[in-house]
Image (cartoon, rainbow, N blue to C red):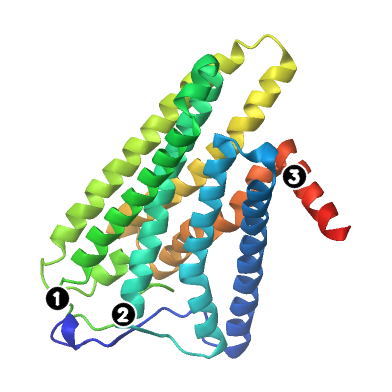
Amino acid sequence: MSNSSSLNKFILLAFADTRELQLLHFSLFLGIYLAALLGNGLIITAVAFSHRLHTSMYFFLLNLSILDLGTISVTVPKSMANSLWDTRAISYSGCAAQVFLLLFSLSAECSLLTVMAYDRFAAICRPLHYGILLDSRACVQMAAAAWASGFLSAVLHTGNTFSIPLCQGNTVGQFFCEIPQILKLSCSDSYLREVGLIVVSACLAFGCFIFIVLSYVQIFTAVLRIPSEQGRHKAFSMCLPHLAVVSLFISTALFAYLKPPSLSSPALDLVVAVLYSVVPPAVNPLIYSLRNKELKDALRKLVQRQHQ
C-alpha cells in the first residue's frame, strides 16, 4: 500500500485463533466490561443521588468514573465483537475514532487524577482554607480544564498520527488501534514528529506524577502529626485508594508508550495494553469503594430505596 489514503481498514491483533479460545476471550472481556459498567455506574448513581456525597472529592470521583467508562467502552466492545464474529477488521475511520476517544479519556484521566491529589492535599494540609480553595465553582473549572486538556491532546495526536503516510501494510499489532503500533506502519522517518509529541505528552504526564508524589509527601507528613489513631486511619483511608489508582494508571501507561524497542514483543504489548486500558476502569470502583464507608452507605441506601 503506497500511503494511508489508500487504506480503508486495519487488521487488528487477534487474542486467539481457535474458536474455543475466541469464545473464552469474549466471555472474559464481557465479564470485565459488565463489572466496569456496574461498578462505575453505581458510583455515578450514588454520587448523583446522595446529597451527602455532593462534595469536591466525590464530584471528581464521578468524573473519573465517567472517563473510566469511556476508556473501557472504546476498546473492549469492538474486541469482543471481533472474537464473537471471528473477524479482525476495523474501518479506517473506526480506527481514528478509537485513537481519538482513547487518548481523550486517558489524557483527561491523568489531569483529573492530578486535580484529585490537589483536593486531598487541600483537605488534609489546608483544612481551614479548603472551602475557599475548592468551592463548587473551582471544582467545575478544574474538572472542565481536565476534560479540555484531554480533548486538546486527542486532537493533536490523532491529527498528527493519521496525517503520516503508511506504507508497511495495514496490520496493527494490538487488539485496538494504538499509536505506537500505527507508527510501525509509517514510511521512513515520517513518524518522528508524532514520536516527539508522545515524548512531550509523556513528560507532561510525568510532571503530573511528580506533582502527585510531592502532594502525598506533604499529606503523609501532615497525617503522621495527627495525634489520634482514628484520625490517622480516616486520613489514610481517604488517600490510599487514590494513590493506588494513580500508581496503576501512570506506571502502565508510561511503560506502554515509552518502553524501549528491545523489550517489545506481541505478547508483552498485549499484556501491557490490557493493564492500562482494561484493568483500571474495572478495578477503580472496587479500590475506591472498598474502604469508603460514606460511599458504601450511600449505595446501601440507594439499593434499599429501590426495594421499597
**What's the distance in space between the residues labelled 2 and 3, CA to CA?**
42 Å
The quadrant in which the N terminus is found is bottom left
Residue 160 pos. (x, y %):
19, 64
> Which numbered disc, 1 or 2, marks the residue that appears first in the sequence?
2
**Is the residue marked by circle 2 packed among few (<14), some (14-19), or many (20+) residues within 10 Å?**
few
> Which numbered disc, 1 or 3, marks the residue that appears first in the sequence?
1
Task: Please report the residue visible at 54 percent of the width from the left and 36 percent of the height from the top.
Answer: 243
Q: Nearer the viewer, mark 1 or mark 3?
A: 3
* Identity of the residue furthest to the left in this view: 189
| Quadrant housing residue 222 | top right
Residue 180 pos. (x, y %):
29, 64
Q: Does 224 sit above or below residue 87?
A: above
Task: Please report the residue visible at 82 percent of the width from the left and 59 percent of the height from the top.
Answer: 306
Left or right relative to 96: residue 166: left
Q: Is residue 171 visible?
A: no
Left or right relative to 126: residue 290: right
Write down the residue under mark 2: 93
Q: Are marks 1 and 3 in contact (CB under 8 Å)?
A: no
Write down the residue under mark 1: 165
Residue 237 pos. (x, y %):
66, 31
Q: Which secondary structure lies at badge 1?
A: loop
Write down the residue under mark 3: 298
Q: Nearer the viewer, mark 2 or mark 3?
A: 3
Q: Nearer the viewer, mark 1 or mark 2?
A: 2
